[in-house]
Image: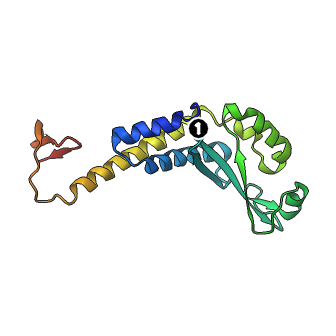
Amino acid sequence: MFETNELNRVIDQLADKKGIDRDVLIETVEAAIKTAAKRAFGDQRDIEAQFNEDTGEVELFQVNVVVDTVENPYREMSKDAVDQLGLAAEVGDELLFQIFYLQSDKIRAEEQDKKFGDILQLESARTTFGRIAAQTAKQVIIQRIREAERDMIYNDFKDRQAELITGTVRRFEKGNIIVDLRRADAIL
């Protein structure tokens, strides 16, 4: 995917180029990876995505709630299973298990599968977290960036009603005049 801190650099460049707040871009990347993960690992899982500033990677976590009786094995773990694994948790506690999805984390993923494989059931799902997940993430990122740009332009112009603004006439189109206002086109 990205080298360490390359994602940080890309986010900074996008923030500068598009004028979008860095936090909005980080939330966008987190949402994109989470959406792709849900598609690859299944909607029935409770998955969280968190951007790690130090490594420049988005870390995925599967959230499992400790319960007495398991009704949904993708979201819950029995107290007995927690005790057998030697984890310190009580009924009602949430346990976060990191999902290792990057190729560079293959060894850590194999270790996780050995220890928690029966509970997490991620081994077969990891193989599908590839091209399709990347396309999904890309679509989410593009959509969110467009929404953020639209919101910025709207906020720039919403308080400028009845104000004269200088622009350049670009073309005439079906009885309308298209004016370039630098950050947006206006239709008169």
Residue 15, percent from left and from top: 39, 42
Please say if 104 is above or below 50: above
Occupied quadrant, residue 110: top right
Please say if 45 is above or below 39: below
Say what secondary structure mark 1 lies in: helix
Of 61 and 53, which appears nearest the observer? Answer: 53
Q: Quadrant of the N terminus?
A: top right
Left or right: residue 146 compared with residue 118: left
Residue 181, percent from left and from top: 17, 43
Residue 80, percent from left and from top: 89, 62
Left or right: residue 138 compared with residue 103: left
Per the image, the residue denoted by label 1 is 133
Q: How many residues crowd around disc 1 within 10 Å: few (fewer than 14), some, or many (20 or more)?
A: many
Farthest-out residue, front = 54
Q: Measuring 77% from the left and 40% from the top, which residue is drawn there?
A: 123
Q: Measuring 12% from the left and 42% from the top, which residue is drawn there?
A: 167
Farthest-out residue, right = 84
Amino acid, disc 1: Ala
Q: Measuring 77% from the left and 33% from the top, which residue is drawn there?
A: 107
Residue 163, percent from left and from top: 10, 57
